[in-house]
Amino acid sequence: MAVARTRCVALVGVTGRLVEVEADVGSGVAGLHLIGMLDTALSEARDRVRSALVNSRYAWPDTRITVSLFPASLPKRGSLFDVAIAVALLAAAGFVPAARVAEPFFLGELGLDGSVRPVRGVLPAVLAAVAAGARTVVVPARNAAEAGLVPGVTVIPATTLGALVSWLRSDESPEGVPEGAGGLGHRGARPLPPGRPGEVVHGTGDGLGNDLGDSAGDSAGDGAEVVPDLGDVAGQPLARRALEVCAAGGHNLWMLGPPGTGKTMLAERLPTLLPALEWDQALEVTAIHSVAGVLPKDRPLLVRPPFVAPHHTATVASVVGGGGGMIRPGAVSLAHRGVLFLDEAPEFSTTVLDALRQPLESGRVTVSRALGAVTFPARFALVLAANRCPCARPSTPDDPCACAPAARRRYLARLSGPLLDRVDVKVGLFRSTRRELLADRRFIEPSRVVAERVLLARERAAKRFANTPWRCNAEMPARALHTEYRPPPAAMSPLLRHLDSGLLSARGLDRILKLAWTLADLAGKDRPELHETNSALGLWLGEER
């Protein structure tokens, strides 16, 4: 009887912290004691571990067992530690060599029958393990594809505790831990292939020993999912142009118009114009969705910008992030590097709407609770859609809307001035006649054509920002806008006149300058000129210029 140690990871937001799991099997009153600031789910691990060991045909030590999770001051939550606790206990009891469990990281939940069940947050946990120097990580088989995305680590998929113990006892690979498991991880980062909406990239081959890889490959290639296309939207040429500008520069958008004019259709098609995520962005987005527990089973890696559209009854915690025990990311973080769409925006709580102001500026959100604060990334393109009045009825001279002017003002006033000041592009939509719809069909372009122009504009911006941390024009700070990236005086003149008259705020000026750079990138110009600044001013004011 001795002390055995192994390693696991505790998740704090989307960041992993190294945890050492120590097990001591010694004399004393028989029982299993877990220490180290545990939540309810982790405290219940004593029953899961005991049943898993007994049902795996291992004798339970009839003595005092103490399991410590270090550092003791770090709160630990969830069932992620079950496998590490069981392995450390078995090593302390002499069932497996203590040296074999000291170096690897063990992640996973145990079933009462000894099965190793999948858990959320495997990707950020493996990233933290690699940062701590791990060379081998044992994960549930159903999480192996997700863990295999991390370079420089060997991923061992485990299906049962018995198979894992047999592997730890010898060099042979038992059932559930296939031979060549080291091939499940890759040693170096690979380039991210261009993806279609819904396309996935798998970090493992067929060596998983389960049907995850096959089903994922089928779903990615059978084309069953209908992808929205910008060519479906007719009669709104200005809104389609505004959508292209927002995609090219990562700008926010507000669409105001009666129902049935295509606001929701346009918002849903914005992701089809955005380029595929780069490798580091894809890992970041996938890690957030993994921690939230919403990562699709057939998509170990998200390569397309996410599209998140919460219902207007959503609470602040569901949009910004929060939770009673474990703090989880909200809609603003799930939309990181993608699009957050608020349909019927005035119907949202004003508290929810105003809570968006801080992440729109900083690109991250910090959720503070009594036990500490957690910061989530939240750099997204915000799309707001609203009707012109509460009743949303078509208004004609013969049959005007019944809403009083004061009711209309109160309805739209739910979108506060500071929030709209952070929206770069404002566009009004109107009902189109049959003649307008037919005439506009000659100018409609599919998403593929518009996405090519967006990609060229993004490449021009990326070349300009090569030695900076910025990825698109929307991320430029104010200092850069007024120094090296300031347009010539002739192009600034209409903006300065509006600034002097009080119609334009300092933040609004910065937003317009970013828009002007995006318009210049789409036009293939090196710097914005008077035409670009005038057009950007019109987009910000919601006027055609």
Image (cartoon, rainbow, N blue to C red):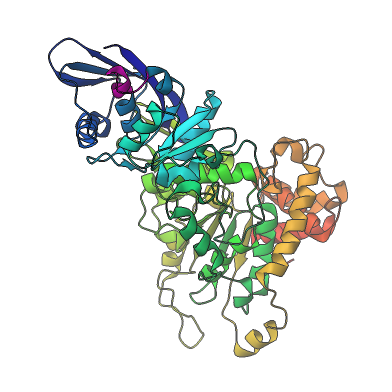
Q: Where is residue 411 in the image (x, y as percent from the top left)?
A: 43, 62
Q: Position of residue 333 (x, y in %)?
A: 49, 45
User: Compared to 370, does 433 lie above or below?
Assistant: below
Residue at (50% x, 77% y) in the render: 260
Q: Quadrant of residue 538?
A: bottom right
Q: Give the range drawn in magenta.
A: 88-97
Q: In which quarter of the image is residue 70?
A: top left
**Number of dots carrying numbers:** 0
Residue at (71% x, 66% y) in the render: 450
User: Compared to 385, does 419 lie above or below?
Assistant: above
Of the 4 image quadrants, the one containing the C terminus is bottom right
- In the image shown, does 395 or 360 lie closer to the viewer? 360
Q: Where is residue 223 in the image (x, y as percent from the top left)?
A: 55, 70
Of the 4 image quadrants, the one containing the N terminus is top left
Q: Position of residue 495 (x, y in %)?
A: 76, 51
**Residue 44 lies in the magenta stretch:** no
